[in-house]
Image (cartoon, rainbow, N blue to C red):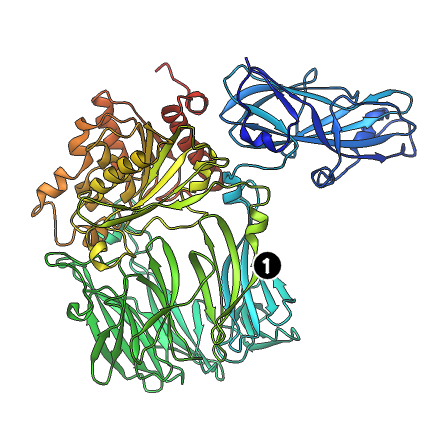
Amino acid sequence: MKRNILILSALCACCSLFAEEVTVKQFRYAGPYEIKKPFLADSLDVNSKKFTEKELLKTAVPFDNVRESAQTLDAGTAAGQADAYSVSLVSFYLNSDRYTDGTLLISGPETYEVYLDNAKQTPANGEIKLTLEPRRYEVVIKYLAIPGKTNDAPKATFKTDSKAVVTATTSPEKRYTLNDVFDGTRLRSVSLSPNGKYLLTAYQTTFTGGETESFQQVTDRATGQVLMESGSNHYSWMPRSNRLYYTRKGMQGKELVTVDPATKAETVLASNLPDGWFSFAPTEDFLLFNVSEEGPKKGEDLQEILVPDDRQPGWRTRSFIHKYDLATGLFQRLTYGHTSTSINDISEDGRYMLFTCSERDLTKRPFATTLLYRMDLQTLETELLLKDPFINYAQFSPDGKQLAIAASGEAFNQIGLNIAPGQTSNMGDGQLFLYDPASKQATAVTKDFDPAVQSFVWSRADKQIYLQGEDKDCVRLYVLNPANGSISPIPLKEDILSDFTLANTVPELVYFGESASNSQRLYSVNLKKNTSVCLKDLSAGILKDVTLGEVHDWNFQAAAGDTIYGRYYLPPHFDANKKYPMIVNYYGGTSPTERSLENRYPSHVYAALGYIVYIIQPSGATGFGQEFAARHVNAWGKRTGDEIIEGTKKFCAEHPFVDAGKIGCIGASYGGFMTQYLQTKTDIFAAAISHAGISDITSYWGEGYWGYSYSALASANSYPWNARDMYTQQSPLFNADKINTPILFLHGSVDTNVPIGESIQMFTALKLLGKPTAFVQVMGQNHQIFDYKKRAEWNKTIYAWFAKWLKDQPEWWEAMYSEKAL
């Protein structure tokens, strides 16, 4: 019985597809490469083996030769008798629409080797047993032509007993997969020299399997020439002199070394440098160190826990500030006590330092108060400038007369709040204030600015403040004029700003970022001319041969009258006349699900597996204004859950290509809580996945390392003893009997943020209730899954669960988690 051919094959009609067999009709071809027998110095090799013609097949030929070849060869082509020995390469690609087992049969040449994705296979009687996941596989056959013998081109057939739709093609087009997310070279940071002439760029390359390699490059901005590259030294720019610096081990201890990028000449600034993290003074004549000191150790068998945070490893370690004079080598302590002090900034003239420490008060939200000090580094006279529980850190203006302070809206007696009556501010919605130490007056400069401030830099070049802000599902850059408070966007080429750097003396900006359908690109911007140039496009290599589906915005008006924003992803080669299963994803924590290609749940990977992916930004997410973000506080599913359900239903109603009976949902952390909560409110989902989700707000509040402190944001001033209805009625565990949707619980076994017990107790409840569920713990992993191999298996577990319930394809799940007779 004939099956529908996967649309990928339309690009190259080179295969015949039947219910159980795919015959390769055409190969990509490279060769022949003539080779000669080696000189036989002896009749036997070092292992007493006699030379045979098969030894000639060991001749190395780069597989890129056939990948880049435009020549094709029909399968089974009779080549006749060869005049000389030669090696040839043929290749093709196998694609399956689902997880399937099968057999690859190879025939034709007498002597050949087969490689699957560069890994050598061992055929048994010309057969190779394969398990295909829904992605592209490259098959390369290297074969030997022997003089005096008939040398036919290879033949290849793939057979399977499953219902999988498998294609064989010479087109390199492929789905977007986990390997495209994990592997390859990515930018990690950028930094301009003070004069903007040179750019320091940090990279990390991840190889298939998880091995990584980090390196830095210094380039000449005018020519693009790479002047320096290092994988061992960690370079940074001096504040003024356009020289790099790094540390190394010397004969007299740690050395501080500067490097001229133009000449590569090195100068040792200091020897026997103290240990610890340090920063240069703008005047380049001294360093400020953060030096760690260990507190009293806990017992080995019995451990006293002083405060909830004392459970955290290293919590008793404190850090203090020291000054190192480069001229004399004098290393002087600047702060002392039992409370850590943190450097915020050094004034441009090197005279003053801003630093912070905190006073713990567990009886009052947010459980600690920040103290901001200004120290005269010549006299060590220190002034307490501010004492406020809602400020984070501060930076001097270029002239040292003002401060820019990152805080939440409740800082400075709530002058920055812009929320509705009765609301409590979402502390995750970042704000910026200007503060005059002389008059002790503060100005809330972002009060009416909807994007949430993530970071800022007060430019020495133009005296403007550059804000990195969370704008709905994007991360953008803005410039704030401190003289009049006006804020304007900097036009960027990407939706997600990852890092940016400003020159100190010229109006130059360099940044990199990504968008919904491309990986990283590096740009330079002339801020005076407002012109932009792409310096490096890493995305082009990462997405080589990848076909992505379309991404569209889709917003709806909720019952409460608000516009709820979202977007959706279509599978590659989307057919509007088909019905597709759908996956719904929503925010965790309080940040929106950003418009990036590479993230925890890469939407294009799901789309490539044949799903519609709907991303919704419901109430409570930051980046949509303070009032919208404040809806997260003391809600725990209220309104947010209703909007997800409403949006999902309306999306299905407006898009007939969605199979409304095959909708899944997924979320992590607070999003994992939301997954569980939604199933207590609706049966519209056919499958659900909760990663590191909260099932009982009370147990999470008390057990997670940051449970009580996150609750200062999400459960402001509400505790189990004064808000028992919220802690119980909003907790999915207390409503487990209402759940009918099959839920998969995923959790790192050593999660210190949301303890694994949150999944255990909900899984136990559903098991006792006889509800369909599964629980997979990722051993040795914390709140996020970072280990390369475990992250891949974790993702495949997600794919297999959705395939089982949304596509009626249980094979993948059964292969990973076969039924046990226990």
Q: Quadrant of the N terminus?
A: top right
Residue type, mark 1 in image: Gly
Measured along the vertical axis of the image, is residue 617 above or below residue 344? Answer: above
Residue 808 in the image: state x and y as whole percent: 39, 21
Q: Is residue 384 above or below residue 203?
A: below
The residue pinned by badge 1 equals 231
Q: Secondary structure at mark 1?
A: loop
* Front position in the image: 248 or 71: 71
455 in relation to 663, above or below: below
Horizontal side of residue 341 vs 714, given as left or right: right
Residue lying furthest bottom: 379
Residue 757 % position (x, y): 26, 36
Quadrant of the drawing holding the C terminus: top left
Is residue 453 found left or right of 123 in the rendered image?
left
In depth, the one of 614 and 764 nearer the eye is 614
Q: Position of residue 230 (x, y in %)?
A: 61, 62
Point 92% across, 28% down: residue: 83
